[in-house]
């Protein structure tokens, strides 16, 4: 037994030795294979995961840039240029009510359609909420003011978009926010437009890139908070703390964005080594993808086991098996790499295609918007568009100019009621209660029915207002200045009435002279109706008594574009002859072509007869006046001869050559002498006026001194002034030379001084002034007599006109003095002017040229 047991033990030992040798060989081979495969798997995973992490980072950056661009575009819209309903902000609602500022909510609805933003919000410059959209989320907000948020402060400070770190939104979903500030032209902050992005989308992307059951990944923000997590059963609420700490440490290292870095760390559970790939995003976040090092061993264990079982039995084919294993492993990794590359390429293509489509849509929308704005700003009508809440959506420049509106009245969001009240208060709708006027017009607008009317503005401008409803609600209104059109229409009506009611005949013909129109006066004068003469030539009125040369001249003148005026004798429909005066001229088109001829004809038959009678009467009057003048001249000569004898004998008796006269006889003789001299002066005046009217008054021009003539006349008439107790002064130079008829000038001075003495009462005063200048000389006689009424001044220079209040006094003359003065002055080339005021006196000024 013992010998057998020894042999058995030896076999066992040999077997054990052989087995040990085989086991050691297998262990060495397996150990080497495991180490090589593990090192290869780690290296391959690191390269692939680094590329995936970099691609994810680039994708996230593009998505953030696209969404930021969308917010920028919306913030630049006119509706975002103000916060019109600040007065309706309620802290209990965390902003304005749901029905306020509908224009902004409609715009935000369109931005939510692609579902990339979960919530959109508008903040006031102070950080207080203005609105959040959808409104249901606004009611759930826990904070009313966000001024302490870092992204709000960054956007307000720089004026550029800013992105937040992770937070839990009002709807309970993890999210981040993008803040885009809106500035005015001066760089002042108007509002903050923000969009909230749900982070579960990021988690879905992570889950699609993890290779279960080993890979895991997280996304952390700038503060190290986990935004998204996937793999190994972790979530954003319960991430792998060791991986999060490693990602935070990498973030603190300030690595360049977009570049993948592979690092190892030890997990807290079991102190297990983990391999991770880190990439920083441009937004400041960090993507981390990790895999436990032990998973690589688990992954290659089936291969090592299969090799171990085959080493002992298949030593001869170990090389083939190793090759097959290597080839098999390489094939799997290559397939995985190709699949990942294809997925990456497809993702890139989709991103580029979507970006290109979006850019094209934006360019098309921008071009159409600019075209529409240009068209609206260049039409002559004022256009305004109101939504179904009666708030202004848009208007053109002409709307503000035509209605003279301040900027706040054309700002989008302005209510129709405010606009109407502004107009009513400045009197645009006429007198009345402004609130009643506003209520009536708001009721009309709320009916959303087409309307059209004209109204007169307070400045006299006439406007035509046309309103039409829009299919989507609201209405569009156009305002047209029809002032000139109304004036032209009224002028046309006035012209038409004037032509129809004209007291003269009006005839309009075509360029060939055929009649198109005649007015009622033509029908009345000629006897033809419009229907009878339409299309005929005016020659139907020819009488044959007007020379053909007149018609030839007429056509030659009007065909050349001129106006012909003349008289012609025509024949009525009844055969009766009549005279008419015509003015015929062409009517031209804007380019100068003759379209019609217009004839204005006046029936002058009665005037012709009156003129003939007047000419005959005038000739008779002239003959009678000439006979009168001749008669007066002859009678004056006949009266002067015996009167001269009477005055001669009176002088003899006054000189007492035949002996002294008794006192009462002397008074009789003196009376005879005064009366005779007065009669002689009248006869002389009659002779002078007769000679002037007959043209026999001769002017003899020579050098003379007007001052000497004036002094001589004053010396002759001063005794009469002394006799009536009238003062007589002279104002003149030593000499006033001129070339004229001294006799005629002397007669003017004597007549003027004589008139002044006649009409100045005792105690009065007369002033004679002579002066000269470059144009001529002036002789002025001013008295303080009774004066002449203003309504009589126009008659004072007519012969035999006496306008004094003492007309019955024969000593005042017969009214020829001033008439003779004016006619003599005119013969000398001068003028006579008179100024007078009853009760204060009269001033007569004679102006003579220095050379007559």
Image (tube, helix red, strand yellow):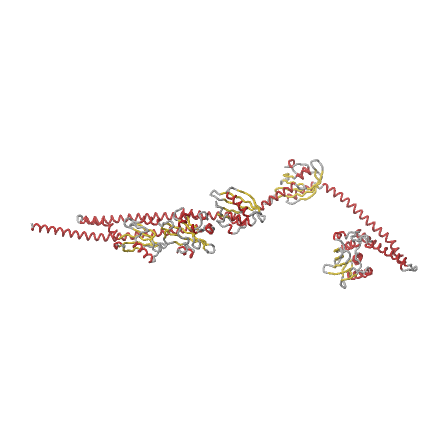
Q: Give the x, y percent position of residue 106.
A: 44, 47
Q: Give the x, y percent position of residue 444.
A: 52, 43
- Residue 834 shows in the view: no
Q: Is residue 766 left or right of residue 444?
A: right
Please determine whether, in this image, residue 702 is positioned above or below residue 619: below
Residue that extends furthest to the right in the rendered view of this protein: 659
- Between 186 and 569, the residue placed more toward the observer is 186
- Between 261 and 634, the residue placed more toward the observer is 261
Indicate the quadrant containing the C terminus: top left, top right, bottom left or bottom right. bottom right
Please determine whether, in this image, residue 706 is positioned above or below residue 408: below
- Between 264 and 390, the residue placed more toward the observer is 390
Q: How many numbered discs? A: 0
Q: Give the x, y percent position of residue 515.
A: 64, 38
At horizontal 88% and vertical 53% (from top left) the residue drawn is 642
Please determine whether, in this image, residue 149 is positioned above or below residue 608: below
Residue that extends furthest to the front in the rendered view of this protein: 92
Q: Give the x, y percent position of residue 187.
A: 46, 56
- Residue 674 shows in the view: yes
């Amino acid at each position: 037994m013992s010998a057998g047991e020894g042999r058995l033990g030896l076999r066992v030992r040999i077997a054990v030795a052989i087995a040990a040798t085989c086991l050691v060989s297998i262990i060495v081979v397996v150990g080497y294979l495991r180490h090589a495969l593990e090192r290869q798997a780690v290296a391959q995973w690191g390269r692939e995961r680094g590329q995936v992490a970099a691609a994810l980072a680039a994708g996230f950056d593009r998505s953030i840039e696209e969404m930021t661009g969308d917010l920028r575009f919306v913030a630049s819209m006119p509706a975002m240029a103000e916060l019109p309903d600040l007065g309706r902000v309620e802290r209990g609602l965390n902003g304005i009510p749901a029905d306020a500022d509908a224009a902004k909510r409609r715009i935000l609805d369109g931005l939510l359609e692609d579902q990339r933003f979960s919530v959109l919000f508008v903040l006031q410059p102070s950080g207080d909420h203005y609105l959040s959209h959808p409104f249901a989320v606004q009611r759930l907000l826990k904070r009313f003011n966000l001024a302490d948020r870092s992204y709000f402060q960054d956007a307000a400070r720089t004026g550029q978009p800013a992105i937040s770190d992770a937070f839990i939104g009002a709807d309970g979903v993890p999210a981040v926010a993008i803040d885009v500030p809106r500035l005015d032209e001066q760089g002042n902050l108007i509002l903050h437009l923000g969009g909230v992005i749900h982070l579960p989308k990021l988690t879905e992307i992570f889950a699609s890139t993890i290779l279960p059951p080993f890979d895991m990944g997280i996304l952390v923000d700038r503060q190290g908070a986990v935004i998204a997590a996937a793999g190994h059963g972790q979530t954003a609420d319960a991430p792998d703390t060791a991986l999060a700490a490693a990602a935070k440490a990498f973030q603190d290292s300030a690595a360049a964005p977009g570049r993948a870095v592979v690092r190892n760390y030890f997990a807290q559970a079991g102190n297990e080594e983990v391999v991770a790939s880190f990439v920083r995003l441009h937004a400041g976040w960090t993507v981390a993808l990790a895999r436990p090092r032990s998973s690589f061993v688990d992954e290659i264990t089936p291969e090592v086991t299969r090799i171990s079982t085959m080493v002992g039995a298949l030593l001869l084919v170990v090389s083939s098996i190793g090759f097959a294993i290597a080839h098999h492993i390489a094939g799997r990794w290559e397939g995985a790499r190709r699949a990942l590359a294809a997925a990456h390429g497809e993702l890139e293509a989709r991103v580029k295609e979507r970006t290109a489509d979006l850019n094209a849509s934006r360019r098309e929308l921008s071009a159409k918007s600019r075209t529409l704005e240009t068209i609206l700003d260049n039409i002559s009508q004022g256009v305004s568009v109101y939504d179904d809440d009666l708030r202004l959506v848009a208007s053109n420049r002409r709307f503000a100019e035509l209605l003279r509106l301040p900027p706040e009245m054309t700002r989008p969001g302005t209510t129709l009621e405010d606009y109407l009240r502004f107009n009513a208060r400045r009197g645009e709708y006429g007198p009345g209660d402004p609130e009643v006027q506003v209520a009536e017009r708001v009721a009309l607008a709320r009916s959303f029915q087409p309307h059209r009317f004209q109204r007169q503005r307070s400045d006299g401008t006439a406007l035509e207002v046309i309103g039409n409803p829009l299919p989507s609600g609201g209405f569009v209104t156009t305002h047209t200045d029809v002032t000139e059109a109304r004036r032209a229409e009224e002028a046309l009506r006035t012209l038409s009435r004037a032509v129809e009611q004209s007291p003269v005949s009006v005839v309009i013909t075509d360029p060939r002279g055929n009649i198109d129109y005649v007015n009622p006066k033509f029908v009345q004068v000629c006897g033809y109706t419009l229907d009878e003469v339409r299309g005929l030539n005016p020659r139907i009125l020819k009488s044959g008594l007007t020379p053909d040369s007149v018609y030839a001249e007429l056509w030659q003148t009007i065909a050349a574009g001129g106006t012909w005026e003349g008289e012609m004798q025509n024949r009525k429909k009844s055969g009766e002859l009549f005279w008419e005066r015509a003015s015929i001229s062409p009517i031209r088109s804007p380019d100068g072509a003759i379209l019609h001829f217009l004839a204005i004809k006046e029936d002058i038959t009665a005037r012709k007869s009156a003129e003939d009678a007047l000419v005959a009467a005038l000739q008779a009057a002239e003959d009678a006046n000439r006979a009168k003048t001749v008669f007066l001249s002859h009678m004056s000569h006949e009266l002067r001869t015996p009167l001269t004898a009477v005055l001669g004998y009176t002088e003899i008796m006054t000189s007492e050559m035949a002996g002294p006269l008794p006192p009462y006889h002397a008074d009789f003789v003196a009376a005879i002498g005064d009366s005779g001299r007065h009669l002689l002066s009248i006869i002389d005046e009659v002779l002078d006026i007769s000679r002037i009217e007959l043209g026999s008054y001769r002017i003899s021009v020579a050098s003379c001194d007007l001052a000497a003539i004036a002094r001589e006349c004053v010396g002759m008439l001063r005794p009469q002034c002394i006799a009536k107790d009238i003062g007589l002064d002279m104002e003149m130079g030593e000499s006033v030379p001129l070339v004229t008829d001294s006799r005629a000038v002397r007669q003017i001075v004597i007549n003027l001084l004589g008139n002044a003495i006649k009409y100045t009462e005792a105690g009065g005063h007369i002033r004679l002034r002579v002066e000269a200048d470059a144009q001529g000389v002036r002789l002025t006689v001013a008295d303080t007599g009774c004066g002449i009424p203003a309504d009589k001044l126009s008659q004072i220079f007519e012969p035999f006109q006496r306008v004094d209040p003492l007309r019955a006094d024969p000593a005042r003359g017969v009214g020829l003095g001033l008439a003779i003065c004016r006619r003599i002055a005119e013969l000398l080339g001068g003028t006579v002017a008179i100024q007078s005021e009853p009760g204060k006196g009269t001033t007569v000024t004679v102006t003579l040229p220095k050379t007559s």
